[in-house]
Amino acid sequence: MRYRLVVMGASLGGLNAMQVLLKSLPKDFALPLAVVQHRDKDFVDTALPALRAHSLLPLREVDDKQAIEPGWVDFAPNDYHLLVDGDHYALSVDELVNLARPAVDVLFISAAEALGPEVVGVILTGTGVDGAQGLQAIAARGGLALVQDPATAEAPGMPSAALACVPQAVVLPLEGIGPFLARLT
């Protein structure tokens, strides 16, 4: 397998987008997925159970120093940056990045530095520019850059910013991202 990790970032509209995406991933999807979703403090109590209803894969909120495991969908905890540190995750309470903590750029840049060309970065719907520089870092190290087609995004800001930084990214409608990822395993 060429890739070792899929990293995803979303903001406004991300929960709806994740429901669509998770529905399309098969139970035997072998890659780990790390997700930064800009969110409120009730995410674990409300959104994760709703997402579990749409997923054949197990979902969890990341703990510090937790191993990166194939087939898991791991979400950054509220108010912590999520980083990739070798074969495990690290959490940080460093300053806000792009007005957010967790920030997509922090996850993506750390994944690019740790795994180079073995990372797939996916930018989904959202406002602002978070994730654009991180996706650029992934592409610069030979990783695969995917962006939700801004025309299919509830909020096209993040996908549009990502495409401005990484014009060579693969652009797919939301419904096409899960099947595309499934073909990578």
Image (cartoon, rainbow, N blue to C red):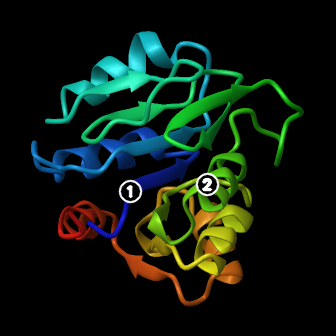
Query: Which element carries disc 1, helix, strand or loop?
Result: loop
Q: Nearer the viewer, residue 78 or 148?
A: 78
Q: Could you tell me which quadrant the N terminus lies in? A: bottom left
**Does residue 53 appear left or right of residue 106 in this picture?**
left
Furthest residue in direction left, as rendered: 27
Secondary structure beneath dot 2 equals helix
* Rendering coords of residue 132 (x, y %): 69, 66
The residue at 30%/18% (across/down) is: 49
Q: Amino acid at mark 2?
A: Ala
In the picture of the structure, the residue carrying the numbered disc 1 is: 4
* Residue 24 vertical position relative to residue 100 in the rendered view, above or below: below
What is the quadrant of residue 85 in the picture?
A: top right
Task: Judge from the rendering whether residue 97 lies leftward or rightward of residue 24; answer left or right.
Answer: right
Can you give x and y, in whole percent of width and height, for residue 7 in the image? 48, 52
| Residue farthest toward the right in the current orientation of the protein | 95
User: Label 1 neighbourhood size at 10 Å, few (<14), some (14-19), many (20+)?
Assistant: many
Coordinates of residue 60 in the picture (x, y in percent): 38, 22
Disc 2 designates what residue?
114
- Mark 1 and mark 2: Cα distance apart in space: 11 Å
Residue that appears at 37% across and 49% down: 17
In this rendered view, identify the residue nearer to me: 85 or 169: 85
Q: Earlier in the sequence, mark 1 or mark 2?
A: 1
Residue placed furthest toward the front = 86
Q: Quadrant of the C terminus?
A: bottom left
